[in-house]
Amino acid sequence: MITLTDQAASKVKELIESEGDSSLALRVAVKPGGCSGFQYDMFFDSDVTAQDQQAEYNGVRVVVDSESAALLIGASLDYANGIQEQGFKISNPNAQRSCGCGKSFS
């Protein structure tokens, strides 16, 4: 299952608080698409099923469906807020290659 760095968990927690619904979880999924075969999808979700894998990082609940979880083993989500880079980035050791835009992998 994917892990969150402290920076990512802090930013996600801030975004959830701005939504005003503390029951929301961060859902991370892998979907077919993009120029390399798969692409990541992240969104806030309150619909968690028994088949979802769940973890908590610094007060942030993360859920992943079982199919995506197999592709996210050992992956981590980080957040950068600097001059060169800004935003969320997934580092995935299972990705054999990624596209130039950095949004899809195979």
Image: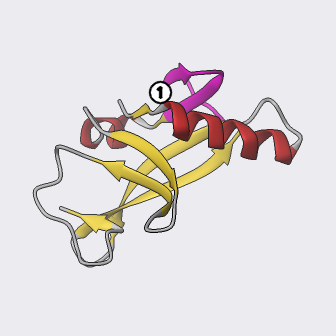
Q: Secondary structure at mark 1?
A: loop
Outermost residue, left side: 96
Point 26% across, 33% down: residue:
73
The residue at which mark 1 appears reads as: 51
- Horizontally, residue 48 falls left or right of residue 106, namely right
Point 34% across, 36% down: residue:
69
Q: Position of residue 47 (x, y in %)?
A: 68, 37
Point 65% across, 21% down: residue:
59
Q: Is residue 15 above or below residue 55?
A: below
Q: Is residue 75 above or below residue 80?
A: above
Q: Is residue 59 above or below residue 78?
A: above
- Horizontally, residue 55 falls left or right of residue 76, namely right
Q: Position of residue 98 (x, y in %)?
A: 20, 66
Rendered image quadrant of residue 10: top right
- Bin the neighbour count of mark 1 within 10 Å (Cα to Cα): few under 14, some 14-19, many 20 and up: few
The answer to if 59 sits in the magenta stretch is yes
Q: In front here: 55 or 50? A: 55
Residue type at mark 1 is Gln
Magenta part of the protein: which range?
A: 47-63
Point 35% across, 29% down: residue:
1
- Horizontally, residue 35 falls left or right of residue 44, namely left
Rendered image quadrant of residue 40: bottom left
